[in-house]
Each structure stands twice: as C-alpha cells, then as structure tokens.
Image (cartoon, rainbow, N blue to C red):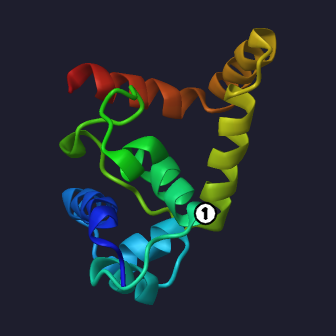
Amino acid sequence: MVKEEDRSIIERIKQLRQANSLSQASFAKLIDVSSGNVGQWERYVTLPSAAALKSIALKLGCSVDWLLFGSRSNKTCPPFTEKKAEIITDPDLARMIAVLKEIMNDPDPRRRTWAVMQFEDAFKQYCSAFDEKKLRA
C-alpha cells in the first residue's frame, strides 16, 4: 500500500488524467503501461515507476517535479485545462513527428532553418491551408 504522504502524487496523476478526458485504459496506452498499473495507482496499491513518471511528464506536458511535489514553479507545467493529450496510433505519423521533433531540437539553428524550409517547400499546399485556417481561428 502507498504511504499517506505519497498519495498526493497519485492524486495529481489522476487529476491530470481526468482533466485530459482520458480513461484509465487510454491513459495507460498513452504512457505505455498496462491499464492494470493505472488502476493499482489510483487504488493506492503501488506508486508509478520513474519511467512511468517520465512518460507522463513528456506526454502530458508537465514536469516530474510537479508530479512528485506539486511545485508549480516549473514553467513546463501548464494549467490542466490548456493541454489535451493526443494519442497517435498511426505508426507512420508517430515516426514523422519523432523525426521532426529531433530535427527541431537540434542545437544548430541553421539545420533547424533548413528543415523548416524543406518542409514548407515539400508541403506548400498543406502549409498554406493550415496557415489560412489558423488566421481564421
């Protein structure tokens, strides 16, 4: 059983899951654990592993520090209602997103600029339509 002083960790995780309108099963799939794990956490049977905490933080846009301690000082933890998790089930799309993220996190600004130019050139019609939608919103 989870110690009383550690229950707030689980309460924050559950609050984050519910704020993103995720069932235990969809949340488990998103963070790559079994739905049984999530159920055990929410019944205060076990605590999530470090890997699970890291996955929650990365997928839902908060910090591990916030999950563990409730600290709102970290700028990477948005208010609950601002971010919705999106589960990407298409493996090709997941791969494309992962590659683009890696390129855009490259420390060389020239490489990032080159990648943006290549992307916009390759997908002109989609970029234009996306930009127009964004302006109308």
Q: Relative to 35, is 51 on the left or the right?
A: right
Q: Residue 131 versus residue 50: which sits nearer the camera?
A: 50
Q: Residue 53 versus residue 79: which sits nearer the camera?
A: 53
> Is 43 placed above or below 90 here?
below
Residue 63 found in image quarter: top left
Asked whether residue 63 is in view, the answer is: no
Residue 136 found in image quarter: top left
Q: Relative to 6, is 96 on the left or the right?
A: right
> Is 61 placed above or below 6 here?
above
Residue 94 found in image quarter: bottom right
Q: Residue 62 versus residue 49: which sits nearer the camera?
A: 49
Q: Residue 9 versus residue 53: which sits nearer the camera?
A: 9
Under circle 1, the secondary element is helix
Query: For the C terminus, which image quadrant?
Result: top left
Q: Which residue is mark 1?
A: 51
Query: What residue is drawn where x is 30% and y is 44%?
Result: 70
Query: What residue is drawn where x is 60% and y is 63%?
Result: 51
Query: What residue is drawn where x is 22% and y is 60%?
Result: 15
Query: For the N terminus, which image quadrant?
Result: bottom left
- Tell me the amino acid under the disc marked 1: Ala
Residue 68: % across, % down = 40, 51
Residue 95: % across, % down = 69, 55
Residue 131: % across, % down = 40, 23
> Is 92 placed above or below 28 here?
above
Q: Relative to 101, is 65 on the left or the right?
A: left
